Image (cartoon, rainbow, N blue to C red):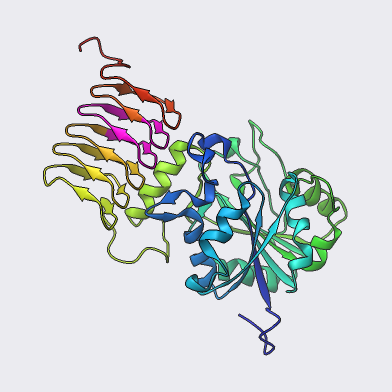
Amino acid sequence: MTTSDAATPEVQALILVGGKGTRLRPLTLSAPKPMLPTAGVPFLTHLISRIREAGVTDIVLGTSFKAEVFSEYYGDGADLGVNLTYVTEKEALGTGGGIRNVYDALVADTVLVFNGDVLGGTDIREVLDTHRSSGAEVTLHLVRVGDPRAFGCVPTDDDGRVTAFLEKTQDPPTNQINAGTYVFNRTVIGEIPGGRAVSVEREVFPKLLAEGRHVQGHVDSAYWRDMGTPEDFVRGSADLVRGIAPSPALAGVSGESLVKAGAHVAVDAVLVGGTVVGADAMVGPKARLDGAVIFDGAIIEAGAVVERSIVGFGARIGRGALIRDTVIGDTAHIGARCELLRGARVWPGVQLPENGVRFSTDI
């Protein structure tokens, strides 16, 4: 999707990946959230692959927290068939400020903007088509959800033009929410105040509407999930493995589990619910993994049960332990027959002794 002059792309993409991922701690103490393994590859790889599939190959990454991790892993982007440019925030600038911060790296007239923690299934080309055909200055991707109260709410008129941008409310007038993907005319990005924190939701979009500018909505019901919490991270990873969420980065047949190269899984272990077993991980006899995300090098010992949980790099789950709705940090060691339930988080390197934490009365 370029003009005849290959040096000037018609469309560029900007991915905002500067957040600290505090809701996913302790996993994000060592890696930025977009780099956490999701269905076997860094989450960001799924998004880059979707952008490339839409014909957009010039991508800017707006980084901040652990910025070096991105460039060390992706380099110039050639391995993924894209050209990557990196722009780093020296201080937190918010979504609007983060977009403005990369302005000098933008040469295309049309800029696709993505939040780097959203797993989506919408056809990016259709969002671009809506932007072009409507003549809008900014287009927002909106998704319909069953319960919009926890999200920013965006009503539109009969022509699809955005009429308001409402923050979370207990009585939303529409089930259309902001999906975190935008198309900007580059000139509008240049109008965002520079050098300070700016919110697109609270400042940029309301200002455009107040000025009577054309902000369009592209509304669909495609797959969409904010991957910011452990629960959503686990479910998103499982949906990718099972083929519910689409990703060009995943080759092969979808199913109940994905086992990476070098992993060792006992023949009588049970892997269901979109479980992922990372490279060089080990799963012992009679272990049961249901909707589990097991990072590289982790060990699940015999008879352990891991349900809807994340087990960090090099962590060890002892024999007969029960891990449910829990996050286990890198290199932590959970002793045999421990029980960790309902939102527990174990920090990296922590060691729990055998029977050290129990919810059951028996030992």
Q: Is residue 53 something one can see in this rendering?
A: no
The answer to whether 47 is drawn above or below residue 3 in the figure is above
Residue 354 in which image quadrant: top left
On whether residue 28 falls in the magenta region, the answer is no
Residue that extends furthest to the left in the rendered view of this protein: 268
On whether residue 318 falls in the magenta region, the answer is yes
Residue plotted at (88% across, 55% down): 211
Q: For the image shown, how many numbered marks are present on the structure?
A: 0
x then y, percent, for residue 37: 42, 50
The answer to whether 57 is drawn above or below residue 279 in the figure is below
Residue plotted at (63% across, 46% down): 65
Residue plotted at (28% across, 50% down): 280
The answer to whether 38 is drawn above or below residue 187 in the figure is above
In this picture, residue 55 sits left or right of residue 88: left
Residue plotted at (66% across, 33% down): 169
Which quadrant of the rendered structure holds the N terminus? bottom right
x then y, percent, for residue 287: 19, 36
Which quadrant of the rendered structure holds the C terminus? top left
x then y, percent, for residue 129: 62, 72
x then y, percent, for residue 305: 24, 32
Residue that extends furthest to the bottom in the rendered view of this protein: 4
In this picture, residue 25 sits left or right of residue 20: left
Residue that extends furthest to the top in the rendered view of this protein: 361
Q: Is residue 234 something one can see in this rendering?
A: yes
Query: Which residues fall within the magenta stretch?
Result: 306-332
